[in-house]
Image (tube, rainbow, N blue to C red):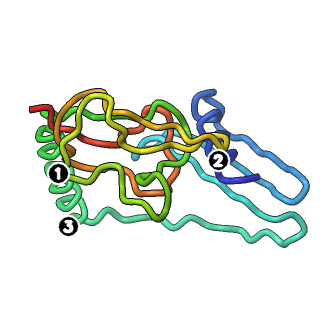
Amino acid sequence: MDIKQIQNLIKFVAKSGASEVKLEMDDVKITIKTGSEDSGERAVIQQVPMGMPQQQVIPQQQQPVQPAAQQTQATSESANNEAKENDKYVTIKSPIIGTFYRKPSPDKPAFVEVGDSVNEGDVLCTIEAMKLFNEIESEISGKIVKVLVDDSSPVEFDQPLFLVDPS
């Protein structure tokens, strides 16, 4: 079972409302537990090869630390400021699931770099899906402000790829 299948299983369990799911296959045993605690929803995954002894894991009780709470508040404030700043930009999102590539081939330059001006219809990247390379074109004219995905990394449907300043 690969990581994608496990992620899809987690999403399915979370949407179904089940509190616990156990799955045993030939060489893999997976237990997914979801529940509601003070901190919100949680998912616990245990993947153990069959035939190996399982160890009892006792969760440690965590004590809240005041400086960490202050740091979290500062982090959320900076995230809010960044979100407000990004509101003036247009986000170009992935139309498909696949692998994101900034270059047409490894020995060629990237389609676009931060600071480049693009016109509507210009190719920004390619996304490989099922051995087909799909060119993703700009929906608007503007200037590339930020590339939000690393080269050769997997992307999901509707995942933000680029921030474009349309002015």
Q: Which of marks 3 and 1 is nearer the N terminus?
A: 3
Rendered position, 153 above or below 159: below
User: Distance between the Cα atoms at labels 3 and 1?
Assistant: 38 Å
Please name the amino acid that badge 2 sits on.
Lys
Look at the numbered disc 1 and give the secondary structure of its residue: loop
Residue 5, percent across and down?
69, 45
Q: Which mark is residue 115?
A: 1
Badge 2 vs badge 1, beta-carbon distance below 8 Å = no
Q: Which residue is the site of mark 2?
A: 4
Q: Could you tell which of marks 2 and 3 lies nearer the N-terminus? A: 2
Residue 163 x %, y %: 24, 41
Q: Which of 161 and 105 is in front in this view?
A: 105
Q: Look at 31% across and 62% down and name the residue there.
A: 64
Neighbor class of circle 1 (other Cα within 10 Å; few <14, some 14-19, many 20+) is: few
Q: Position of residue 149 (x, y in %)?
A: 38, 51
Distance of label 2 from label 3 (alpha carbons) = 36 Å
Which three-letter amino acid code belongs to the residue tagged 1? Gly
Label 2, label 1: how far apart the Cα atoms are: 34 Å
The three-letter code of the residue at mark 3 reads Pro
